[in-house]
Each structure stands twice: as structure tokens, then as C-alpha cells.
């Protein structure tokens, strides 16, 4: 018997998550919740929007929201339990890996061993996570990001597409690593870094970002 999963967010990411759910044994996509699309509308052939995000889903849900702070906020207004971990069958997850509820690991991702990930973490296609990494909650790894061994990503960190984090480093809560950046030193909380090597290019007030 399949567990039906509600996808919160009906944009491009929502459709990608619905696709992932359809490929995972034991789960099936139920419907979308979205504040910006009228209830009853069909989403590019994928299925209906049942109502706004504030509507309580009647099944476990997954948050298909890219922005980490928004994802965290939405998690606080939904009373239904988050979905179990959703791992695409073409991802490779090794031994002694603990992934928090509501998290997704997409096709082509590699997650090696002795790794801890918090709730509602997103690991997108072709990402690599090395041994002994520790991730907080609401972390996002965009397509092709590579995290070397023994890296710590605090709550709400986003790694841009194709970025690289070298071994043993820590990235502080709410920080963003730009696409293609190479992180060679620890990064403080609530900043954006970019470049090779990555340098701080912006600071975010905590109340506006994370």
C-alpha cells in the first residue's frame, strides 16, 4: 500500500518533487498546496492544487520550497507530519547515514557514510556528500554541489549549483554559497560568498534571511 504525499509548492521544484515521489517505491503523489495558484487548478498535467499552503494537508507532506527561510517558516504552520525521507532509486546512500524527516535526495546524488542531515534537507541531482558530514535543518544542496568529508553545514545553508566545499570546513547558519564557488575557509553565518576561492560578497540581516 502506497503512502500518499502532499507536495507543498506547485512551482518547478514542486513538479520535480512530484516526479521523484512517483519513482520511489511505497509512495505516491497526492496533490499540491500553493498560495499563488487557485484551488482546483491543474499544474501542467501533474495534478490539482487542493488549496493554499495554510490548509492542513490530510497526508504527510514534503516542502518543495527552494528558499530555506521560507521552508522553515512554512514548516511551522503545518500540523500534519512531514513525509518520511524520500530517496530516489538512482541515488546512492551508503551506510550509517541519518537523514531527517521530510528530506529529499534526488537522482544521481551520492551520500557516502557516517553522515547526519537535519529535517527538510534538499539534496538535488548529482550532488556529492562526503564522509562524516553534519548538516543542520533546512539545508539545500543545489544541482552538482560537492561537499568534501567532515564538513559542517549549519541550519539553513544553501550551496549553489556546482559549488565545492573543501574538507573539514564549517559554514554558518543561513549562509549562501554561490554557484560554482569553491569554499576554502570557514564561512560565518548569514553571508553570501562567491568566487574561487569563495569570498564574502553580501551580509544578510538575520531577521530578513534566516
Image: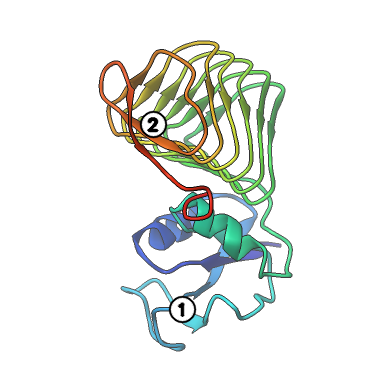
Image position of 81 (left or right of 109): right
Along the line of sight, the residue nearer the viewer: 118 or 101: 118
Secondary structure under badge 2?
A: loop
Q: Earlier in the sequence, mark 1 or mark 2?
A: 1
| Residue 161 x %, y % | 32, 35
Q: Which mark is residue 176?
A: none
Q: Residue 144, located in which quarter of the rendered image?
A: top left
Along the line of sight, the residue nearer the viewer: 124 or 139: 139
For label 2, the crowd category at 10 Å Cα-Cα, with few meaning under 14, some 14 to 19 and many 20 or more, is many
Residue to which mark 1 is pinned:
35
Residue to which mark 2 is pinned:
126
The answer to whether residue 34 is above or below residue 97 is below
Q: Residue at x 39, y 85 (%)?
A: 41
Image position of 160 (left or right of 133): left
The answer to whether residue 189 is above or below residue 54 is above
Image position of 116 (left or right of 176): right
The answer to whether residue 102 is above or below residue 180 is below
Q: Residue 71, located in which quarter of the rendered image?
A: bottom right
| Residue 91 x %, y % | 49, 33
The answer to whether residue 99 is above or below residue 119 is above
Q: Residue at x 46, y 88 (%)?
A: 39
Inspect this view and state whether residue 35 appears: yes
Amino acid at each position: 500500500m502506497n503512502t500518499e504525499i502532499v507536495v507543498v509548492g506547485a512551482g518547478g521544484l514542486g513538479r520535480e518533487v512530484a516526479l521523484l515521489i512517483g519513482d520511489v517505491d511505497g509512495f505516491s503523489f497526492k496533490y499540491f498546496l500553493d498560495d499563488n495558484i487557485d484551488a482546483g487548478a491543474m499544474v501542467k498535467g501533474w495534478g490539482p492544487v487542493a488549496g493554499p499552503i495554510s490548509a492542513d494537508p490530510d497526508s504527510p507532506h514534503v516542502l518543495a520550497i527552494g528558499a530555506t527561510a521560507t521552508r522553515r517558516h512554512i514548516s511551522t504552520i503545518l500540523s500534519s507530519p512531514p513525509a518520511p525521507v524520500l530517496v530516489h532509486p538512482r541515488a546512492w546512500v551508503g551506510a550509517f547515514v541519518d537523514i531527517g524527516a521530510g528530506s529529499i535526495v534526488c537522482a544521481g546524488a551520492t551520500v557516502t557514510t557516517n553522515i547526519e542531515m537535519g529535517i527538510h534537507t534538499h539534496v538535488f541531482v548529482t550532488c556529492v556528500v562526503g564522509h562524516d558530514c553534519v548538516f543542520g535543518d533546512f539545508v539545500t544542496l543545489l544541482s552538482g554541489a560537492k561537499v568534501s568529508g567532515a564538513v559542517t553545514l549549519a541550519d539553513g545553508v544553501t550551496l549553489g549549483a556546482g559549488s565545492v566545499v573543501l574538507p573539514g570546513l564549517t559554514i554558518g547558519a543561513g549562509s549562501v554559497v554561490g554557484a560554482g564557488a569553491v569554499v576554502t575557509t570557514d564561512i560565518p553565518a548569514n553571508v553570501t560568498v562567491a568566487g574561487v576561492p569563495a569570498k564574502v560578497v553580501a551580509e544578510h540581516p538575520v531577521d530578513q534571511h534566516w
